[in-house]
Image (cartoon, helix red, strand yellow):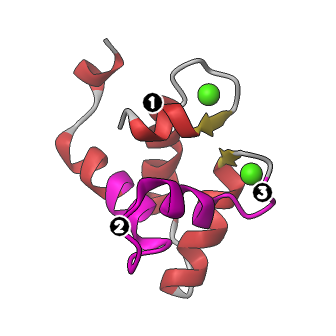
């Protein structure tokens, strides 16, 4: 349902960011764990931003906006975190 309001470009940016964390490992669990910096089993918005900055050396406001809106869509149950199940369903 949320996907209808979700542009393809936003989707691609978000998925590529999720994949870039551990790009040499193909297992989705490994890439999820690469994003889960504090190993609490959930990926927060701050963790995604931190990983993005590590990968790109910085971040600008337009990317922050895209990440924020993408994160809200990925967080299907609106608890403020993306679980492994939510990540896998992207
Ligand atoms: Ca976490
Ligand atoms: Ca969630």
Q: Which mark is residue 26?
A: 2
Magenta segment: 14-39
Q: How far is disc 2 from disc 3 in space, using C-alphas?
A: 19 Å
Residue visible at 65% across and 48% down in the picture? 43
Residue 60 in the image, given as x and y percentages of width and height? 51, 70
Q: Which mark is residue 73?
A: 1
Q: How far is disc 1 from disc 2 in space, using C-alphas?
A: 23 Å
| Callouts 1 and 2 close, C-beta under 8 Å | no
Q: Residues within 10 Å of mark 1 (few under 14, many from 20)?
A: many
Above or below residue 12? Residue 53 is below
Quadrant for the N terminus, please: top left
Residue 67 in the image, given as x and y percentages of width and height? 48, 51
Indicate left or right for 35 with 38 as reference: left
Q: Which residue is mark 3?
A: 39
Q: Earlier in the sequence, mark 1 or mark 2?
A: 2
Residue visible at 48% across and 83% down in the picture? 56
């Amino acid at each position: 349902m949320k996907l209808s309001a979700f542009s393809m470009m936003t989707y691609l940016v978000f998925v590529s960011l999720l994949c870039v964390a551990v790009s040499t490992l193909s297992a989705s669990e490994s890439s999820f764990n690469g994003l889960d910096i504090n190993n609490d089993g959930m990926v927060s918005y701050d963790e995604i931003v931190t990983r993005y900055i590590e990968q790109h050396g910085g971040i600008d406001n337009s990317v922050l906006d895209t990440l924020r809106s993408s994160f809200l869509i990925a967080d299907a149950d609106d608890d403020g975190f993306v679980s492994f199940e939510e990540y896998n369903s992207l």
